[in-house]
Each structure stands twice: as structure tokens, then as C-alpha cells.
Amino acid sequence: MKACGLIVEYNPFHNGHVHHMKQSRQESGADCLIAVMSGPFLQRGEPAIMDKFHRTKAALAEGVDIVLELPYLYAVQGSDWFAEGAVRTLYQSGVSSICFGSESGNSRAFTDGYAMFKKNEATYRSVLKHSLNAGAAFPDASQLAFQHIGLNGGNMDLEQPNNILGFSYVRTIMDNNLPITPLAIKRKKSHYHDQTMVGSIASATSIRNKLLQDRSVSEAIADTLPEETIRQLFAYLEKTGSWHTWEDYFHLVHYRVMTMTIAELAAIHGVDEGLEYRIKRTARVASSFYDWIQRIKTKRYTWTRLQRMFVHILTNTTKTDMHRVKQLREVPYVRILGMTKMGQAYLNRQKKRMDVPLISKLGKTMDPLLSIEEKVSDAYYSMLPADKWEKGHQQELQPPIIMD
Amino acid sequence: MKACGLIVEYNPFHNGHVHHMKQSRQESGADCLIAVMSGPFLQRGEPAIMDKFHRTKAALAEGVDIVLELPYLYAVQGSDWFAEGAVRTLYQSGVSSICFGSESGNSRAFTDGYAMFKKNEATYRSVLKHSLNAGAAFPDASQLAFQHIGLNGGNMDLEQPNNILGFSYVRTIMDNNLPITPLAIKRKKSHYHDQTMVGSIASATSIRNKLLQDRSVSEAIADTLPEETIRQLFAYLEKTGSWHTWEDYFHLVHYRVMTMTIAELAAIHGVDEGLEYRIKRTARVASSFYDWIQRIKTKRYTWTRLQRMFVHILTNTTKTDMHRVKQLREVPYVRILGMTKMGQAYLNRQKKRMDVPLISKLGKTMDPLLSIEEKVSDAYYSMLPADKWEKGHQQELQPPIIMD
């Protein structure tokens, strides 16, 4: 059986994902679609609108065969390390191709781009370093360095965040000589950053913002979402009373910062270059999470980077935790969240070929990295009232969701 | 000018305190009454109903001349270390006597009791150790050991928590040969543990419970409180929207425990003998703070001890912090919260004789122990909404309250 990998957040699963899924199945010729999905917190450093189990159900209902969880220590990271975790998880799952969205849909542009990058990598690194030292934010510095070696515009415009992710997947595959074909799928949707609704081709960001703003599914939104996503959104709201936003965690992360010493704060992953002082100082006057980031932000720190840092503070993720995972040559395990019957049949065969354990639920004795996952999951549910938080955790102890 | 010391919590300042104050002034013959008061958290391991500044105002209005703050690392502790901090703070303040409540009002019983204790200290310690090893809680074990050496009943019944505190003060004074006369003042009130109201002689505990239960000052309560206490209670409620109870901190301390590793939890002061596992396990199912303690409690751990431990978890107070303060031969400083004009005149003269700094407000560069005070104060206010928490902190930066 031939499998194809998708790298996703499904926050929430929308019509753009349906399109991408169908195109991926067609272009890869795969029987089995495997999605590796961020868990409670997303790459951009935000809590997912609803938990990973509800997002898994929506995806399975719409045609994904297997949903795997990208471990937290890969998920809430810059694109390189995010790609490392996602691609290696898919590699363990035995996919022969990985599909990713791009503006052009031209796979060749990415592999050619990689060749050009390798040839000029030293120049790229030196320009990058120079810009970073001059105080630029990483994305801007990287952008400039790519341009410098001729990687700009044309078929692989690296100003598009999706193309940057796609390029990171291609780099991970090719740097490691993995037997996986990267396939760029042409996006049908509006731009990633577009915050306004444009009928059924709305961006993930605009859908999420509209949902969280309205706390309900308006007609315009319903147009952009498969039925099962709407059902899961309401099921989650009914169970917990909430969809998750950063502001719901503000009082927790604020309390946490106020009771940390400067040294403890500096030990958290992402709190670098003296940011600990800036965080402490601004904490005194921050009136909301949004306001807090505004006060910390400078040219050097992107909003995304600061949001990620706050996720690490909230979840108490240290530089030591990060150092440990960076030592690994392979992802520590593959965690399965849900699958169809077909996906189950596929995994039953594939698991014998994996170099790492296939984890179906959290248990009593666990890999230290799984303990981190449990802590992160607990942090995610901690903004809910006491009678709700344990329900989320219970699902972590159950076998994966299986959909007929 | 002759000064007398009181050791208090004023949670809130009630008619029993007025009585004790007048008796103390009379029996000590002092011109100046100096109260050393617990700050945000109390000896029994609870948040004070309103903040220390409002409690200070109530006390000054009713006749106390100076209110000093007992540092947190002494305040939320067993009676021996609590007494160490309180008596030494008063010693630095130059008091010639310390008045404390007792059932009998017989000071001689305490000094004779001390003599008997010193003679039999080795036996006391061996009986105490034996009971502790057998799994008894400290108060029970200590009780038994006192009985064993003949310190029970009569004029100094050590089953009364107030007498235990009084005896601890006497021990601290006499062990250190401090030039201070201990004066036992006969209590007029109902028993410390009594939770029901008995007119104007209600216990502090019953007043507090009734206030927190009603969230208002009923007629029965008004009877037991001076006018200024009532005014301060309402002023605080108006400013912050809250009186503080443990349940208000439940979601914060729960979030904190859920995101700590076992090793981090074990590093907290008071988390001993493998309690970290018990705390973690019960956290999953606790539905309230009360419920959580119920689930942790065994014969070995008293409610008070567990509450204190939770205050240390909430405030992130470590065994290392505690070790540091235990090394000191003297209290690190004397912090003044408020004073009358007369108190101010007294302190102006006395401060030249102090061996430690007299601190009138928190500032930018601080003793590490003052940083702990600031953290504790921030933790106290952290259950308030964002627009309120900074107001409390602002007061920490102001000069002491001065009352005409």
C-alpha cells in the first residue's frame, strides 16, 4: 500500500484542507493519506481552537486515513526544526511522498531551489549571520539571505510562509537522503496572511479569527467548513464551554511569570538575549496577552517568536528539555491520535518496520519526552473550569480514535 | 519611651484584638505598641482576607502605634520558626516586653514551663522523634512529648494553639537571653478553634468564615468588629472586587502543579517525604482546593501543614530559599508597613540602634529576601483581574502609611 504524508494543523479543518487532501491523493497516487498534526499548541505559538482529538475526528471524517501527533518539542518551533520532526515522523510511517501547499504547485522549483541553496549555503549562512547580528528578526534575515543567493520570486517565492515551510520539508528530505518524493500542491485559497473572508476560499487565519470573534459559526464561516468540522466545534464547545484563545491563558502565564525568578525565566526555551528582564518589566503593566506582546515586541522579535516563547513559559519547557530532544537522531516515537479501518490495516503492517515505538496512548510509565507531552496537554486544558480539565486528560489515556 | 510588642495576623482586626491591645498597654506600662504582623499569607497557610495595607490601617486606627511585617519566610511556618522571626523583629524594634494571649493569663506558668522544658529537653526530643517516626503529625507528637515531661494542663495547657505560640515566644526569648519580658494576657474570647459566633467574643476563625461565607458584614459580625475594620473590608472589596480565600487560588496552584516535574515539586519548601507524588496524583481528580487537601491528608499531615505547603507551591518558595534564611543569625531587615506620628517618633530614634536595615518600601535594587517578599505579594494579588493586580503592587513601592 502506498502512503502519502501531509503536514498540518487543522485549526480547524476547512475546505482548503479538503481540496489539498484530494489533490494530494491524486498527484501522489497513494492509497493511504497520513497527516502529522500539531497537538495542543501550533507552530505559530497559539493554542489550537479545540483539542487535538476533536480536530482528529473532523479530519478522519473527511478522508484522512491516519492522524499522527507531531510532538510538542517539534511543533512549537521555527520552520527548520518543525520540518525535522514532521518529515521524520512521516518517514517512520513509511510514506513514499509528502505533499505540501505552494502558490505555484511546481515541485521542481523546490528541488532546484534546494540544489541552488546547497551550492551557496556558505554565502546564505554568512549573510544570515550578518543580518541577525545587525538586529534583524530571523524571518527577515533568512529572507534576505535567500534573495542573496538567488532564491526569490519565480516559482518559489520565499516571501510566502507556506513556501518557506515547503522548502524546509524539501531540505529535510534531501539533506537526509530520505526516500520520499516532495510534491508541491497548488493552493486554491486566498493568501495565508489574509485576515478577511472571501467565500469558500478563506484562509485558515481568517476562519479562526472569525470563529473566535463570534463564538459561533456564521453563515460565511459555515461555507468554508465541512459539516464534520462544524459538528466537532460545537461538540467541543458543549463539553468544555470554550474555544481556546491566548487571552484565556493570560492570567495563568502572568501568574507564572510573576512568581518566577529571573534565573528560572532565563532557563525557559526561547527566553534568550536578556528577554527575561523585558518580560518581567512589562508583566507589571500588561493588561492583556495582546498588550503584553505589544510591549515586548521590537524589530528583532517577531510576534510569532514571542508567542512561541510564551507557550514555553506556560508549559514550563526548559532549554534542558530542548537540548535533550536535539540530541536525538530520530523522532523519539510516533504517536497515533486516530485512524480509519484502512489506516489501521496500514499501520499494523508498517509498525514492524519502524525504528521507534508506535504510541497509541499515554500510560503510567513513560518516556521522559512523553511526560512533556502530558504536561503540555495539561497546560492546554488548564484554562477550563475544574470539572472539565480532567475529561480532556482522560482521552489521552484511551486507545486512538477509530473511524469506520 | 517604652515599647511593647504584639505578634498578630489581624485577619481581620476584631474586638478581641482591641481588648488584647488595651490589656497589653496596661500590663506592660508601655507608651508604644508595636505589632509584628503576617503579610499576604498567614501562619496557618491561608491568604489573608484583605491585603496587609488595609489590615494595617484598621490596626493603626484602633490604637496600634507601629505595624511591622513579619517576612514571609518566617510567617508561613511552624510555631518555632514563626516565633524566631517575630520575636527577633520585635527585639530589633527595641521592645522591653512582648504580650501574647493565653487562657490563664499567667506569665509565670510560661517561664516555669520553659525551665522545666530546658531541664528535660533531651527527653522531649527523644519522645518527639519516636512519635514522628511512628507516623504522628508534628503537633500531636510535640503535644505528647510535652506531656511526657510534665508540661500539660494547669496554667499552661499546651493543647491550646495560642499557648503553644506563647510558649514558643518564651522559648525564643529565653534561649537567646533577649532583654524582653514575656507577658501572658488573659484571653477574653471564645476558643481559637470555635467556628460559631458567640456575640462580641467570637473567635478570629469564626469571624473570617462568616465574612467569607456571606461576602458581606452581617449584624452579628458587625458586633465583633471595630468600625475601621468594617470600613477597610468594604474599601478593599470595592477596590478589588474580592476578599481572598484559598478557593480563589485553586486554578492557579492547580495549573502550577500540573506543569511542574516531580523534581521541581520536590524542590519546594514543605514538599517532603514523597508528598510530591501524592500531590501530583490527587491533582488529576481534585475538584476544589478543599477537596484536594482532603485527598492528600493522612494522619501524618495536618491540614495546616498541607495548606502551608500549598502556599509555598503557589509562591514558588524553594528549599534553597529556606536554607538561605535559616543561615541568618538575625532577621534580614525590619519592614515597616505603617505607624502613627508617635510611632514614627519612636522609630526615628530606634532605627539608629538596629543591627539590620529598616525598610520602608520595596525598591529597584533589593536584598534577595525582599525579592521573595515581592514575589509573594505578586502571588497574593494574582487571583485578581488584570486591571487590579498592579494597584496592590503600587502600594509596596510607596512610603509607609502614616496615621495622624
Image: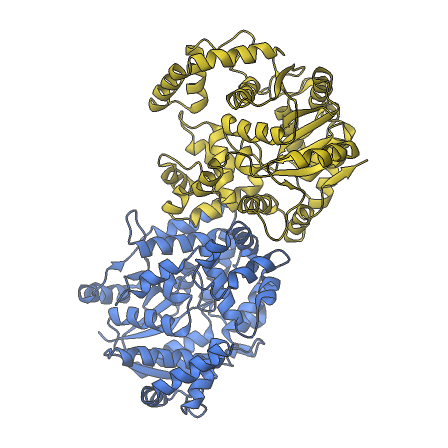
Chain colours: A blue, B yellow
Quadrant of res B348 = top right
Any part of residue A187 in sight = no
Depth check, front residue: A298 or B279: A298
Of residues B179 and A257, the one nearer the viewer is B179
- Residue A28 x, y percent position in the rendering: 30, 81
**Residue at the image position 40 percent from the left and 28 percent from the top:** B298
> At x 61% / y 21%, what residue is drawn?
B180
The spot of residue B238 in percent (x, y) is: 73, 43
Residue at 57 percent of width and 75 percent of height: A195
Outermost residue on the left side: it is A352
Which quadrant is home to the N terminus of chain B?
top right
Numbered circles on residues, count:
0
- Locate residue A255, reporting x and y percent: 55, 51
B379 w.r.t. A289: above or below:
above
Is residue B313 visible in this depiction of the protein?
Answer: yes
Which quarter of the figure is the C terminus of chain B placed in?
top right
* Residue A158 relative to residue A252: left or right: left
Q: Position of residue A161 (x, y in %)?
A: 46, 79
**Residue at the far top in the pictured view:** B154
